[in-house]
Image: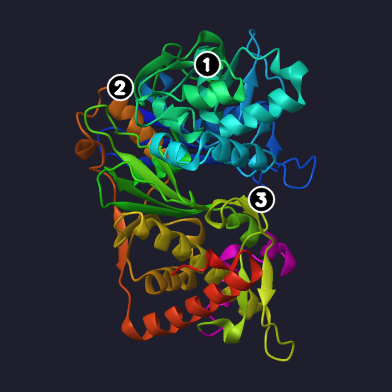
Amino acid sequence: MKYLLGYDIGSSSIKASLLDIATGRCVAAATTPTTEMGMDVPQPGWAEQRPERWWQEVINATQQLQAKYGFDASLLASIGITYQMHGLVLLDKSGHVLRPAIIWCDSRAVEIGNQAFAELGEEFCLENFLNSPGNFTASKLKWVRENEPEIYAQIHKIQLPGDYLAYQLTGQMQTTVSGLSEGVFWNFKTQAIAQELLDYYGISADLLPEVVDTFAIQGRLTAEAAQTLGLAAGTPISYRAGDQPNNAFSLNVLNAGEVAATGGTSGVVYGINETTTADARSRVNSFVHVNSTREQPKNGVLMCLNGTGILNSWLRKVVGNLPYDQMNTLAAQAPVGAEGLLFLPFGNGAERILENRPAAASLHGLQFNIHGQAHLIRAAQEGIVYALNYGMDIMRASGVQVQTVRAGHANMFLSPVFREAFVNCGNVTLELYDTDAAQGAARGAGIGAGIYASPKEAFNGLARISTMEPTPALQAQYQEMYSDWQQLLARETRPAELLLA
Protein backbone atom coordinates (compact mmCIF):
# COMPACT_ATOMS: atom_id res chain seq x y z
CA MET A 1 0.00 0.00 0.00
CA LYS A 2 1.32 3.44 -0.98
CA TYR A 3 0.17 6.83 0.22
CA LEU A 4 -0.25 10.50 -0.61
CA LEU A 5 -0.07 13.20 2.06
CA GLY A 6 -1.89 16.53 1.97
CA TYR A 7 -1.31 19.52 4.25
CA ASP A 8 -3.87 22.31 4.71
CA ILE A 9 -2.48 25.54 6.21
CA GLY A 10 -5.54 27.28 7.61
CA SER A 11 -5.79 30.34 9.80
CA SER A 12 -7.60 28.33 12.51
CA SER A 13 -5.71 25.05 12.33
CA ILE A 14 -3.38 22.84 10.33
CA LYS A 15 -4.74 19.60 8.91
CA ALA A 16 -2.94 16.59 7.45
CA SER A 17 -4.67 13.82 5.50
CA LEU A 18 -3.21 10.51 4.33
CA LEU A 19 -4.74 8.88 1.22
CA ASP A 20 -4.40 5.31 0.05
CA ILE A 21 -3.37 5.65 -3.61
CA ALA A 22 -5.14 2.48 -4.76
CA THR A 23 -8.58 3.30 -3.34
CA GLY A 24 -8.37 7.10 -3.26
CA ARG A 25 -9.79 7.01 0.28
CA CYS A 26 -8.53 8.87 3.32
CA VAL A 27 -7.08 6.39 5.81
CA ALA A 28 -6.02 8.84 8.53
CA ALA A 29 -6.26 12.55 9.35
CA ALA A 30 -4.98 14.88 12.06
CA THR A 31 -5.81 18.47 12.97
CA THR A 32 -3.79 20.72 15.28
CA PRO A 33 -4.01 22.59 17.55
CA THR A 34 -7.03 21.32 19.48
CA THR A 35 -8.14 24.91 20.08
CA GLU A 36 -8.23 27.42 17.21
CA MET A 37 -5.03 29.30 16.41
CA GLY A 38 -5.43 32.94 17.23
CA MET A 39 -4.76 36.01 15.11
CA ASP A 40 -2.70 38.90 16.45
CA VAL A 41 -4.46 42.25 16.07
CA PRO A 42 -1.86 45.00 16.65
CA GLN A 43 -4.40 47.60 15.54
CA PRO A 44 -8.12 47.45 14.67
CA GLY A 45 -8.53 45.97 11.19
CA TRP A 46 -5.12 44.28 11.21
CA ALA A 47 -4.57 40.51 11.36
CA GLU A 48 -1.26 38.69 11.66
CA GLN A 49 0.04 35.20 12.38
CA ARG A 50 3.54 33.84 12.84
CA PRO A 51 4.61 31.50 10.02
CA GLU A 52 6.82 29.64 12.47
CA ARG A 53 3.62 28.59 14.29
CA TRP A 54 2.25 27.09 11.06
CA TRP A 55 5.43 25.04 10.66
CA GLN A 56 5.29 23.81 14.27
CA GLU A 57 1.67 22.72 13.81
CA VAL A 58 2.62 20.90 10.59
CA ILE A 59 5.19 19.00 12.65
CA ASN A 60 2.56 18.28 15.31
CA ALA A 61 -0.02 17.12 12.74
CA THR A 62 2.48 14.80 11.06
CA GLN A 63 3.45 13.27 14.39
CA GLN A 64 -0.24 12.78 15.25
CA LEU A 65 -0.79 11.09 11.91
CA GLN A 66 2.08 8.70 12.57
CA ALA A 67 0.77 7.99 16.07
CA LYS A 68 -2.74 7.26 14.75
CA TYR A 69 -1.86 5.16 11.73
CA GLY A 70 1.80 4.24 11.94
CA PHE A 71 2.44 4.28 8.19
CA ASP A 72 5.82 3.41 6.72
CA ALA A 73 7.32 6.74 5.59
CA SER A 74 9.13 5.00 2.73
CA LEU A 75 5.69 4.23 1.22
CA LEU A 76 4.77 7.93 1.01
CA ALA A 77 4.82 8.71 -2.72
CA SER A 78 4.26 12.48 -2.69
CA ILE A 79 3.08 15.53 -0.72
CA GLY A 80 0.62 18.30 -1.65
CA ILE A 81 -0.02 21.66 0.00
CA THR A 82 -3.01 23.98 0.25
CA TYR A 83 -3.06 27.20 2.22
CA GLN A 84 -4.90 30.32 3.34
CA MET A 85 -4.76 32.76 0.42
CA HIS A 86 -3.46 36.34 0.19
CA GLY A 87 -1.05 36.16 3.13
CA LEU A 88 2.32 37.91 2.93
CA VAL A 89 5.42 36.16 4.32
CA LEU A 90 8.76 37.96 4.01
CA LEU A 91 12.05 36.02 3.97
CA ASP A 92 15.62 37.32 4.06
CA LYS A 93 18.54 35.71 2.19
CA SER A 94 19.00 33.17 4.99
CA GLY A 95 15.36 32.17 4.80
CA HIS A 96 14.46 33.78 8.12
CA VAL A 97 11.01 35.31 8.57
CA LEU A 98 11.34 39.09 8.86
CA ARG A 99 7.98 39.90 10.48
CA PRO A 100 4.66 38.18 11.27
CA ALA A 101 2.64 37.28 8.18
CA ILE A 102 -0.01 39.81 7.17
CA ILE A 103 -2.91 37.44 6.54
CA TRP A 104 -5.99 37.38 4.32
CA CYS A 105 -8.43 39.32 6.54
CA ASP A 106 -6.02 42.17 7.35
CA SER A 107 -7.40 45.49 6.05
CA ARG A 108 -4.43 47.82 6.42
CA ALA A 109 -3.71 48.06 2.68
CA VAL A 110 -7.25 48.86 1.50
CA GLU A 111 -6.58 52.51 0.74
CA ILE A 112 -3.28 51.70 -0.99
CA GLY A 113 -5.15 49.34 -3.33
CA ASN A 114 -8.01 51.78 -3.86
CA GLN A 115 -5.58 54.51 -4.86
CA ALA A 116 -3.83 52.18 -7.30
CA PHE A 117 -7.21 51.22 -8.78
CA ALA A 118 -8.03 54.89 -9.34
CA GLU A 119 -4.63 56.05 -10.61
CA LEU A 120 -3.80 53.07 -12.84
CA GLY A 121 -7.39 53.27 -14.06
CA GLU A 122 -10.29 51.02 -13.18
CA GLU A 123 -10.74 49.89 -16.77
CA PHE A 124 -7.04 49.06 -17.10
CA CYS A 125 -6.96 47.08 -13.85
CA LEU A 126 -10.08 45.09 -14.65
CA GLU A 127 -8.98 44.34 -18.22
CA ASN A 128 -5.47 43.26 -17.19
CA PHE A 129 -5.65 42.01 -13.59
CA LEU A 130 -9.40 41.14 -13.54
CA ASN A 131 -9.38 42.71 -10.06
CA SER A 132 -8.81 45.91 -8.22
CA PRO A 133 -5.41 45.74 -6.47
CA GLY A 134 -7.57 46.12 -3.38
CA ASN A 135 -6.34 44.56 -0.19
CA PHE A 136 -4.38 41.78 -1.87
CA THR A 137 -0.79 40.68 -1.33
CA ALA A 138 0.83 43.22 -3.65
CA SER A 139 -0.86 46.07 -1.77
CA LYS A 140 0.23 44.59 1.56
CA LEU A 141 3.81 44.51 0.28
CA LYS A 142 3.50 48.16 -0.71
CA TRP A 143 2.31 48.90 2.85
CA VAL A 144 5.49 47.30 4.22
CA ARG A 145 7.59 49.35 1.79
CA GLU A 146 5.95 52.57 3.00
CA ASN A 147 5.69 51.84 6.71
CA GLU A 148 8.52 49.43 7.54
CA PRO A 149 11.37 50.42 5.21
CA GLU A 150 14.01 48.79 7.40
CA ILE A 151 12.23 45.44 7.05
CA TYR A 152 11.49 45.96 3.34
CA ALA A 153 15.21 46.54 2.69
CA GLN A 154 16.00 43.05 4.05
CA ILE A 155 13.50 41.16 1.88
CA HIS A 156 15.03 38.54 -0.38
CA LYS A 157 11.79 36.87 -1.51
CA ILE A 158 8.12 37.12 -0.65
CA GLN A 159 6.10 33.98 -0.04
CA LEU A 160 2.46 33.04 0.23
CA PRO A 161 1.67 30.83 3.24
CA GLY A 162 1.84 27.63 1.16
CA ASP A 163 5.08 28.77 -0.46
CA TYR A 164 6.53 29.17 3.02
CA LEU A 165 5.60 25.62 3.97
CA ALA A 166 7.08 24.33 0.72
CA TYR A 167 10.28 26.25 1.54
CA GLN A 168 10.43 24.57 4.96
CA LEU A 169 10.03 21.19 3.26
CA THR A 170 12.37 21.67 0.30
CA GLY A 171 14.61 24.66 0.97
CA GLN A 172 13.44 26.23 -2.30
CA MET A 173 11.66 29.61 -2.54
CA GLN A 174 8.98 29.18 -5.21
CA THR A 175 5.40 30.04 -6.11
CA THR A 176 2.86 29.32 -8.87
CA VAL A 177 1.00 31.38 -11.47
CA SER A 178 -2.22 30.74 -9.57
CA GLY A 179 -0.50 32.06 -6.45
CA LEU A 180 0.74 35.15 -8.26
CA SER A 181 -2.77 35.86 -9.49
CA GLU A 182 -4.21 35.70 -5.96
CA GLY A 183 -1.81 38.47 -4.94
CA VAL A 184 -2.57 40.59 -8.07
CA PHE A 185 0.96 39.97 -9.29
CA TRP A 186 -0.38 38.51 -12.58
CA ASN A 187 -1.54 40.13 -15.84
CA PHE A 188 -4.20 37.92 -17.42
CA LYS A 189 -4.03 39.71 -20.77
CA THR A 190 -0.26 39.37 -21.29
CA GLN A 191 0.00 36.08 -19.33
CA ALA A 192 2.96 37.51 -17.45
CA ILE A 193 3.96 39.24 -14.21
CA ALA A 194 1.85 42.36 -13.52
CA GLN A 195 4.80 44.66 -14.14
CA GLU A 196 2.55 47.72 -14.41
CA LEU A 197 1.37 47.33 -10.80
CA LEU A 198 4.88 46.54 -9.54
CA ASP A 199 6.24 49.66 -11.25
CA TYR A 200 3.43 51.79 -9.80
CA TYR A 201 4.17 50.46 -6.31
CA GLY A 202 7.94 50.77 -6.78
CA ILE A 203 8.43 47.05 -6.14
CA SER A 204 11.11 45.02 -7.89
CA ALA A 205 10.03 41.81 -9.60
CA ASP A 206 13.21 40.29 -8.14
CA LEU A 207 11.32 39.93 -4.85
CA LEU A 208 8.99 37.37 -6.47
CA PRO A 209 10.15 33.76 -6.18
CA GLU A 210 10.73 31.26 -8.96
CA VAL A 211 7.49 30.13 -10.64
CA VAL A 212 6.71 26.41 -10.81
CA ASP A 213 3.70 24.52 -12.18
CA THR A 214 0.81 23.78 -9.83
CA PHE A 215 0.95 20.08 -10.76
CA ALA A 216 4.64 19.15 -10.96
CA ILE A 217 7.50 17.89 -8.85
CA GLN A 218 8.44 21.25 -7.33
CA GLY A 219 11.09 20.00 -4.91
CA ARG A 220 11.97 17.18 -2.56
CA LEU A 221 11.97 16.79 1.18
CA THR A 222 15.34 17.80 2.62
CA ALA A 223 17.15 15.55 5.08
CA GLU A 224 16.59 18.12 7.85
CA ALA A 225 12.85 18.44 7.20
CA ALA A 226 12.48 14.68 6.84
CA GLN A 227 14.13 14.08 10.21
CA THR A 228 11.94 16.74 11.88
CA LEU A 229 8.74 15.27 10.43
CA GLY A 230 9.63 11.60 10.65
CA LEU A 231 9.31 11.21 6.87
CA ALA A 232 11.71 10.04 4.15
CA ALA A 233 14.22 12.44 2.62
CA GLY A 234 13.68 12.92 -1.12
CA THR A 235 9.87 12.59 -0.98
CA PRO A 236 8.55 14.88 -3.74
CA ILE A 237 6.29 17.90 -3.19
CA SER A 238 4.15 17.95 -6.34
CA TYR A 239 1.17 20.26 -5.79
CA ARG A 240 0.36 23.56 -4.14
CA ALA A 241 -2.69 25.82 -4.39
CA GLY A 242 -4.56 28.44 -2.40
CA ASP A 243 -7.42 27.23 -0.26
CA GLN A 244 -10.30 28.24 -2.53
CA PRO A 245 -8.89 26.99 -5.86
CA ASN A 246 -7.92 23.83 -3.98
CA ASN A 247 -11.35 23.51 -2.36
CA ALA A 248 -12.83 23.60 -5.86
CA PHE A 249 -10.26 21.07 -7.05
CA SER A 250 -10.97 18.78 -4.06
CA LEU A 251 -14.62 18.70 -5.23
CA ASN A 252 -13.59 17.97 -8.85
CA VAL A 253 -14.67 21.46 -9.94
CA LEU A 254 -12.48 22.01 -12.99
CA ASN A 255 -14.68 23.16 -15.87
CA ALA A 256 -16.86 26.13 -16.81
CA GLY A 257 -20.25 26.01 -15.11
CA GLU A 258 -19.00 23.98 -12.13
CA VAL A 259 -19.22 25.67 -8.73
CA ALA A 260 -17.79 24.94 -5.27
CA ALA A 261 -18.59 26.41 -1.88
CA THR A 262 -17.11 26.35 1.60
CA GLY A 263 -18.32 27.64 4.94
CA GLY A 264 -15.18 27.58 7.08
CA THR A 265 -13.22 30.52 8.46
CA SER A 266 -14.48 32.46 5.48
CA GLY A 267 -17.56 31.71 3.39
CA VAL A 268 -16.76 31.29 -0.29
CA VAL A 269 -18.48 30.44 -3.54
CA TYR A 270 -16.06 29.74 -6.40
CA GLY A 271 -17.12 29.12 -10.01
CA ILE A 272 -15.07 28.28 -13.10
CA ASN A 273 -15.15 30.67 -16.03
CA GLU A 274 -13.26 30.32 -19.32
CA THR A 275 -13.72 33.99 -20.25
CA THR A 276 -11.71 36.87 -18.83
CA THR A 277 -14.61 38.96 -17.54
CA ALA A 278 -14.60 41.04 -14.38
CA ASP A 279 -17.22 42.64 -12.17
CA ALA A 280 -17.20 46.36 -12.98
CA ARG A 281 -17.04 47.17 -9.24
CA SER A 282 -14.55 44.38 -8.44
CA ARG A 283 -16.81 42.87 -5.77
CA VAL A 284 -15.88 39.34 -6.83
CA ASN A 285 -12.40 38.24 -7.79
CA SER A 286 -10.86 36.20 -10.57
CA PHE A 287 -7.80 34.00 -10.10
CA VAL A 288 -5.95 31.54 -12.31
CA HIS A 289 -7.48 28.13 -11.59
CA VAL A 290 -5.31 25.14 -10.77
CA ASN A 291 -5.76 23.45 -14.18
CA SER A 292 -5.41 26.58 -16.30
CA THR A 293 -2.91 26.50 -19.14
CA ARG A 294 -1.77 29.15 -21.60
CA GLU A 295 -3.60 27.25 -24.35
CA GLN A 296 -6.78 26.66 -22.32
CA PRO A 297 -7.14 29.40 -19.70
CA LYS A 298 -9.52 28.69 -16.82
CA ASN A 299 -10.23 31.21 -14.13
CA GLY A 300 -11.91 30.84 -10.79
CA VAL A 301 -14.40 33.60 -9.97
CA LEU A 302 -14.58 33.93 -6.21
CA MET A 303 -16.86 35.72 -3.78
CA CYS A 304 -15.66 35.78 -0.20
CA LEU A 305 -17.40 36.60 3.07
CA ASN A 306 -14.89 37.20 5.86
CA GLY A 307 -17.47 37.06 8.64
CA THR A 308 -18.40 33.36 8.52
CA GLY A 309 -16.48 31.06 10.85
CA ILE A 310 -15.53 33.94 13.11
CA LEU A 311 -19.22 34.84 13.56
CA ASN A 312 -20.07 31.24 14.41
CA SER A 313 -17.12 31.05 16.81
CA TRP A 314 -18.04 34.36 18.47
CA LEU A 315 -21.65 33.29 18.79
CA ARG A 316 -20.58 30.02 20.40
CA LYS A 317 -18.86 31.96 23.17
CA VAL A 318 -21.88 34.23 23.61
CA VAL A 319 -24.27 31.31 24.10
CA GLY A 320 -22.07 29.56 26.65
CA ASN A 321 -19.56 27.56 24.59
CA LEU A 322 -22.13 25.07 23.38
CA PRO A 323 -20.83 22.43 20.96
CA TYR A 324 -21.43 23.41 17.34
CA ASP A 325 -23.73 20.44 16.74
CA GLN A 326 -25.88 21.58 19.67
CA MET A 327 -26.00 25.09 18.22
CA ASN A 328 -27.19 23.60 14.93
CA THR A 329 -29.92 21.69 16.77
CA LEU A 330 -31.02 24.88 18.53
CA ALA A 331 -31.12 26.82 15.24
CA ALA A 332 -33.62 24.31 13.85
CA GLN A 333 -35.98 25.03 16.77
CA ALA A 334 -36.62 28.58 15.51
CA PRO A 335 -38.85 29.14 12.45
CA VAL A 336 -37.63 30.25 9.01
CA GLY A 337 -36.77 33.93 9.27
CA ALA A 338 -36.15 33.71 13.04
CA GLU A 339 -39.38 35.68 13.60
CA GLY A 340 -38.03 38.81 11.93
CA LEU A 341 -34.50 38.75 13.37
CA LEU A 342 -31.90 39.72 10.74
CA PHE A 343 -28.12 39.51 10.98
CA LEU A 344 -25.57 41.37 8.82
CA PRO A 345 -22.60 38.96 9.15
CA PHE A 346 -19.65 41.29 8.70
CA GLY A 347 -17.28 42.64 11.38
CA ASN A 348 -14.08 40.90 10.23
CA GLY A 349 -12.25 43.48 8.16
CA ALA A 350 -12.97 44.94 4.74
CA GLU A 351 -15.54 42.97 2.74
CA ARG A 352 -14.90 42.76 -0.99
CA ILE A 353 -18.61 42.26 -1.84
CA LEU A 354 -19.13 45.66 -0.17
CA GLU A 355 -16.41 47.20 -2.37
CA ASN A 356 -13.73 46.85 0.32
CA ARG A 357 -15.67 48.80 2.90
CA PRO A 358 -15.03 47.73 6.48
CA ALA A 359 -18.52 46.92 7.77
CA ALA A 360 -19.64 46.08 11.28
CA ALA A 361 -21.76 43.07 12.11
CA SER A 362 -25.22 44.04 13.30
CA LEU A 363 -28.40 42.43 14.57
CA HIS A 364 -31.79 43.90 13.67
CA GLY A 365 -35.36 43.39 14.82
CA LEU A 366 -34.53 42.06 18.28
CA GLN A 367 -37.59 41.68 20.53
CA PHE A 368 -36.74 40.69 24.10
CA ASN A 369 -40.08 39.01 24.70
CA ILE A 370 -39.85 36.91 21.50
CA HIS A 371 -36.26 36.06 20.67
CA GLY A 372 -33.97 33.59 22.44
CA GLN A 373 -30.84 31.56 21.75
CA ALA A 374 -32.41 29.54 18.95
CA HIS A 375 -33.52 32.68 17.08
CA LEU A 376 -30.09 34.27 17.46
CA ILE A 377 -28.25 31.24 16.12
CA ARG A 378 -30.69 30.77 13.25
CA ALA A 379 -30.55 34.47 12.30
CA ALA A 380 -26.74 34.29 12.20
CA GLN A 381 -26.75 31.21 9.93
CA GLU A 382 -29.40 32.72 7.67
CA GLY A 383 -27.49 36.01 7.56
CA ILE A 384 -24.37 34.22 6.34
CA VAL A 385 -26.45 32.52 3.64
CA TYR A 386 -27.99 35.83 2.53
CA ALA A 387 -24.54 37.40 2.24
CA LEU A 388 -23.29 34.41 0.22
CA ASN A 389 -26.32 34.66 -2.06
CA TYR A 390 -25.68 38.38 -2.50
CA GLY A 391 -22.23 37.43 -3.76
CA MET A 392 -23.66 34.70 -5.99
CA ASP A 393 -25.98 37.28 -7.56
CA ILE A 394 -22.90 39.34 -8.43
CA MET A 395 -21.22 36.23 -9.87
CA ARG A 396 -24.29 35.48 -11.99
CA ALA A 397 -24.25 39.03 -13.33
CA SER A 398 -20.58 38.45 -14.28
CA GLY A 399 -21.52 35.43 -16.41
CA VAL A 400 -20.86 32.57 -13.98
CA GLN A 401 -23.49 29.82 -14.03
CA VAL A 402 -24.55 29.05 -10.46
CA GLN A 403 -26.97 26.12 -10.57
CA THR A 404 -25.39 23.11 -8.88
CA VAL A 405 -22.99 23.79 -6.01
CA ARG A 406 -20.63 21.19 -4.53
CA ALA A 407 -19.38 21.42 -0.96
CA GLY A 408 -17.59 19.28 1.57
CA HIS A 409 -19.72 17.90 4.40
CA ALA A 410 -18.02 20.12 6.98
CA ASN A 411 -18.14 23.41 8.88
CA MET A 412 -21.32 25.44 8.23
CA PHE A 413 -22.61 22.79 5.81
CA LEU A 414 -23.01 20.43 8.78
CA SER A 415 -26.02 22.52 9.85
CA PRO A 416 -29.40 21.43 8.41
CA VAL A 417 -30.67 25.01 8.77
CA PHE A 418 -27.70 26.40 6.87
CA ARG A 419 -28.09 23.85 4.07
CA GLU A 420 -31.84 24.47 3.78
CA ALA A 421 -31.37 28.23 3.64
CA PHE A 422 -28.50 27.97 1.14
CA VAL A 423 -30.46 25.79 -1.29
CA ASN A 424 -33.75 27.69 -1.14
CA CYS A 425 -32.46 31.25 -0.96
CA GLY A 426 -30.06 30.66 -3.86
CA ASN A 427 -32.36 28.34 -5.86
CA VAL A 428 -29.47 25.90 -6.29
CA THR A 429 -28.92 22.16 -6.04
CA LEU A 430 -26.42 21.30 -3.30
CA GLU A 431 -24.18 18.23 -3.52
CA LEU A 432 -22.24 17.28 -0.38
CA TYR A 433 -19.06 15.21 -0.57
CA ASP A 434 -16.90 13.36 1.91
CA THR A 435 -13.72 15.30 1.35
CA ASP A 436 -11.70 18.22 2.68
CA ALA A 437 -8.91 20.55 1.63
CA ALA A 438 -6.09 18.31 2.83
CA GLN A 439 -7.51 15.36 0.87
CA GLY A 440 -7.69 17.61 -2.20
CA ALA A 441 -4.03 18.54 -1.75
CA ALA A 442 -3.12 14.85 -1.53
CA ARG A 443 -5.03 14.08 -4.76
CA GLY A 444 -3.29 17.03 -6.42
CA ALA A 445 0.05 15.61 -5.36
CA GLY A 446 -0.90 12.33 -7.03
CA ILE A 447 -1.55 14.12 -10.32
CA GLY A 448 1.57 16.29 -10.02
CA ALA A 449 3.79 13.27 -9.42
CA GLY A 450 2.30 11.35 -12.35
CA ILE A 451 0.78 8.70 -10.06
CA TYR A 452 -2.70 9.48 -11.38
CA ALA A 453 -2.92 9.87 -15.13
CA SER A 454 -5.88 12.28 -15.00
CA PRO A 455 -8.24 14.06 -12.59
CA LYS A 456 -10.85 11.40 -13.39
CA GLU A 457 -8.53 8.74 -12.03
CA ALA A 458 -7.61 10.87 -9.01
CA PHE A 459 -11.26 11.33 -8.03
CA ASN A 460 -12.32 7.68 -8.24
CA GLY A 461 -12.46 7.59 -4.45
CA LEU A 462 -14.51 10.78 -4.02
CA ALA A 463 -17.80 9.86 -2.34
CA ARG A 464 -20.96 11.97 -2.65
CA ILE A 465 -22.94 11.91 0.60
CA SER A 466 -26.19 13.61 -0.39
CA THR A 467 -27.99 15.91 -2.82
CA MET A 468 -30.47 18.59 -1.74
CA GLU A 469 -32.94 20.42 -4.00
CA PRO A 470 -34.97 23.58 -3.30
CA THR A 471 -38.68 23.32 -2.53
CA PRO A 472 -41.21 25.94 -3.72
CA ALA A 473 -42.75 26.73 -0.33
CA LEU A 474 -39.41 27.26 1.38
CA GLN A 475 -38.06 29.17 -1.62
CA ALA A 476 -40.85 31.73 -1.23
CA GLN A 477 -40.15 32.17 2.48
CA TYR A 478 -36.40 32.53 2.08
CA GLN A 479 -36.70 34.85 -0.91
CA GLU A 480 -38.94 37.15 1.12
CA MET A 481 -36.45 37.22 3.98
CA TYR A 482 -33.56 37.73 1.56
CA SER A 483 -35.36 40.74 0.08
CA ASP A 484 -35.75 42.20 3.58
CA TRP A 485 -32.06 41.51 4.25
CA GLN A 486 -31.02 43.30 1.04
CA GLN A 487 -33.03 46.36 1.99
CA LEU A 488 -31.42 46.34 5.42
CA LEU A 489 -27.98 46.07 3.83
CA ALA A 490 -28.70 49.03 1.61
CA ARG A 491 -29.75 51.14 4.60
CA GLU A 492 -26.82 50.14 6.78
CA THR A 493 -24.03 50.43 4.21
CA ARG A 494 -23.57 53.55 2.15
CA PRO A 495 -23.97 54.34 -0.68
CA ALA A 496 -27.42 52.89 -1.10
CA GLU A 497 -26.68 51.59 -4.61
CA LEU A 498 -25.08 48.52 -2.98
CA LEU A 499 -28.57 47.04 -3.24
CA LEU A 500 -28.52 44.86 -6.35
CA ALA A 501 -30.92 45.80 -9.09
- The residue type indicated by label 2 comes to Ala
According to the picture, the residue beneath numbered tag 1 turns out to be: 205
Q: Nearer the viewer, residue 236 or 261?
A: 261
Q: Are marks 1 and 2 in contact (CB under 8 Å)?
A: no
Q: Earlier in the sequence, mark 1 or mark 2?
A: 1
Q: Secondary structure at mark 1?
A: helix
Residue 415 % position (x, y)? 49, 67
| Camera-nearest label, 3 or 2 | 3
Residue 334 within the segment the image draws in magenta:
yes
**Mark 3 Cα-neighbour bin, 10 Å: few <14, some 14–19, many ≥20:** many
Q: Secondary structure at mark 2?
A: loop
Q: Is residue 66 above or below residue 385?
A: above
| Region rendered in magenta | 314-335
| Camera-nearest label, 1 or 2 | 1
**Mark 2 Cα-neighbour bin, 10 Å: few <14, some 14–19, many ≥20:** many
Residue 294 % position (x, y)? 26, 26
**Mark 1 Cα-neighbour bin, 10 Å: few <14, some 14–19, many ≥20:** some
| Camera-nearest label, 1 or 3 | 1
Quarter of the view holding residue 497: bottom right
Give me the residue at 42% from left, 46% from top.
436
Query: What color scheme is it?
Result: rainbow
Q: Nearer the viewer, residue 378 or 303?
A: 303
According to the picture, the residue beneath numbered tag 2 turns out to be: 449
According to the picture, the residue beneath numbered tag 3 turns out to be: 349
- The residue type indicated by label 1 comes to Ala
Q: Earlier in the sequence, mark 1 or mark 3?
A: 1
Quarter that holds the C terminus = bottom left
